[in-house]
Image (spheres, rainbow, N blue to C red):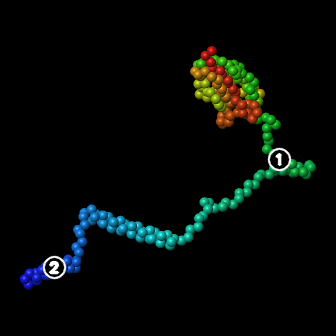
Amino acid sequence: MRKMYKIKWIIPGLLSLSLILAACAPSVPPTPSEAEIAQQVAATQQAKATQNSVETLVALVTQLSNQPTWTPQPACPVCPTQVVVLPTAQTTANPTAGTPVPTTAPTEAAGAKCFQFDFLGDVNFPPGTVVKPGTKFSKTWTVKNTGTCKWTRDYDLVLAGGEAFGTNKRGDIPREVLPGETIDLTIPDMIAPQTAGTYYSYWMIAAPDGARIGYGPGQQWGLGIELIVSNE
């Protein structure tokens, strides 16, 4: 009976002792999975990269703070004002009266120019002439050399604007034209356009040096063509 009583108390004591030992035993951390290990490695690398970026930025700021102060300069230096001295009229002494008389270079007579002309009229195809599409024609004007210079065969008629009517935009002066002479100037082998409509063309006289003149105010008017192309 006494033996059974001892066993009854020994068993609970052993259970209590095992519980105390289990509580006092050090805990063993669980083994991480491959995904958790990869996540930890990535976090470590990102932290290291962030640290490197911060260190680089700090070094750059330090370098810039040590640069000398720079003052912007103007794009170009200020140039001195250029003084232009206009020529003055020269004078010569008049031995008789003793009064200085201005001398000037010889000029052309008032209103006269070396290269100029007047338009005297249309010889054919006056403005508003109606032709069929593709009509071949030659246009002629009468002009007068009102300048002081002679026109040579090196002078030309040149297209100043408008329709070329199938030409190479140039016509010849057939002979020399002295000042005051009249001449008929012609642009040959012209062709009316195939499309119906009103067409304009303007021609001037060109000197050998390339200078061009017309007639009228300021010599700005060209010898004109106004052609109406119609199937009617």
**Front residue of 36 and 120:** 36
Say if 82 sits above or below 148 in the image: below
Residue at the spot x=65%, y=27% of the render? 201
Work out whether 9 lies above or below 212.
below
Q: Which numbered marker is on residue 50?
A: none
Q: Which residue position holds label 1? A: 103
Q: Is residue 116 visible?
A: no
Label drawn at residue 12: 2
Residue found at the far bottom of this picture: 2
Q: Find numbered disc 2 in the image and state the secondary structure of the residue it sits on.
A: helix
Quarter residue 132 falls in: top right
Q: Is residue 147 left or right of residue 14?
A: right
Residue 169: horizontal and vertical position, in percent?
61, 28
Q: Amino acid at mark 2?
A: Pro
Q: Disc 1 on helix, strand or loop? A: loop
Give coordinates of residue 15: x percent, y percent.
16, 78
Mark positioned earlier in the residue sequence (2 or 1): 2
Near mark 2 (Cα within 10 A), the count class, few <14, some 14-19 or many ≥20, is: few
The residue sitting at 62% across, 18% down in the picture is: 230
Report the residue at 44% width, 68% height from top.
Answer: 57
Q: Nearer the viewer, residue 143 or 151?
A: 143
Left-right relation of 42 to 109: left
Residue 113 in the image: above or below residue 6: above
Q: Nearer the viewer, mark 2 or mark 1?
A: 2
Which quadrant is the N terminus positioned in?
A: bottom left
Q: CA distance from mark 2 to mark 1?
A: 148 Å
